Image (cartoon, helix red, strand yellow):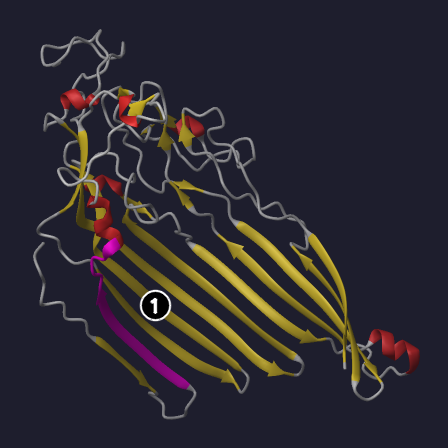
Amino acid sequence: MQNHYNTFGPRIGFAWDPTGSGKTALRAGYGIGYYRIEGNDTQRTAGNPPYSGIATFFRPPFDNPAGGAVAPQTPLVVYGFDPTYDIPSAASWSFSIQRQLTPSLGLSVAYVGTQGLHRDMVSDINQPLAAMGYDFDPRIACTATTPYPCTTRISEDYVRPYKGWSTISNVIPVGNSAYHGLQISLQKRLSAGLSFAAAYTWSKTLGTCTGSDLDGCTQNYYDMKAERGLAAFDRPQVLMANYVYDLPFFKGLSGIGGGVLKGWEATGILTFESGLAFTPGFTSATAGLATKPDRLAGVSVNNGPKTAGQWFNTAAFTAPPFGYFGNAGDGIIRGPGMNNWDMGFFKNFKVKERGNVQVRGEMFNTWNHTNFWDMNTTYGSGSFGQVVSAHTPRVIQLAMRLSF
């Protein structure tokens, strides 16, 4: 692999108070970094011929393992790297405005972006071409260009471009990713018994097989650009807030009533999030080359019942013709969002001069809202479109703590 000596990685940033009052700040920054191939990357090539090989024997006697039946020879799988390997890089930038609204309250508005270039992807340069007729399917008529009789079922290794080899997996740096986000935060430091913080993000993350493993994320290695779509971790909107409040009620109450009713503290965390982006899959005994289904034109994917039995519109998909790739894009299914409230109440009782008893009650998912999580997005599966898991229901926790 060729070396690169021009990997210039600058970092630059500034902070500026345009008013000179100490209450407003403009901040911006940019930086770029690079990835280097390491041992775990090259380990995949350890089994390449001729330096390594595996022999399989069936029913071998213990005193002579080589005396078993030799497994049939099959074409070998080879792993490698693109010799003109471009170094993967990641660039990050931001621009923000911070403003002190009151002595204890501050507001921040920021634009944040990142970009990944030349991300590692695995390409099978020996993948069979679409519609090569290596398997029989009654939906496809035989043609003069079909290399084998349509009534004959054979291995795809017979119709690979490089005969005598199976998969030839090359790591090629052609992936890319991009994140753009508006980030707004409001924070109040403790005053008058109250502190809180709230953060809202409106963003979009796109990429090529972003969020997937190096292997297995690509359907058609001859059209890697078709794998670009919403990242698996894309959430368009996220709103989170937390608070701690020393309740001011009954502060003037004394005696037993004051000991019980005053001095309570309330805390909480609120989470509201859009659902993640899911990519439809495809499984079938006659799948051929396709690992994704076809998406029907003009039919909404996410206009579904939004129930546990069917979250998205399963009628928006169909099986692709045998020998062809599915045209459904990455990240086109929007999963269930999150609506969660965690709340807690605390009460401290003074015990003489150096002792303290704290009684606390905490509720997670206070309103017991059903927050669905994972779904079956594999077309051809019996549970296609169904929700298969959910987040934790309401949990109540009571505790008492003695400190001295």
Expressed as whole percent of the image width and height from the top left, the position of residue 96 reads 35, 74
Q: Residues within 10 Å of mark 1 (few under 14, many from 20)?
A: some
Instruction: Give the quadrant of residue 330.
Output: top left
- Determine the residue positioned at 46% across, 36% down: 303
Which quarter of the rendered picture does the C terminus lie within?
bottom right
Q: Quadrant of residue 251?
A: bottom right
Is 239 situated left or right of 212 in this image? Answer: right
Magenta segment: does it hold 37? yes
Which range is magenta?
A: 24-39
Count up the numbered dots.
1
- Counting from the top left corner in percent of width and height, residue 288 is at 27, 22
Residue pictured at 29% horizontal, 40% vertical: 217
- Whether residue 36 appears in magenta in the rendering, the answer is yes
Q: Residue furthest bottom?
A: 20
Left/right placement of residue 106 relative to residue 11 reads right
Q: Is residue 302 left or right of residue 206?
A: right
- Place of residue 40 in the rendered image (x, y in percent of width and height, measured from the top left): 27, 53
Note whether 376 is above or below 17 in the view shown: above
Residue that badge 1 annotates: 111
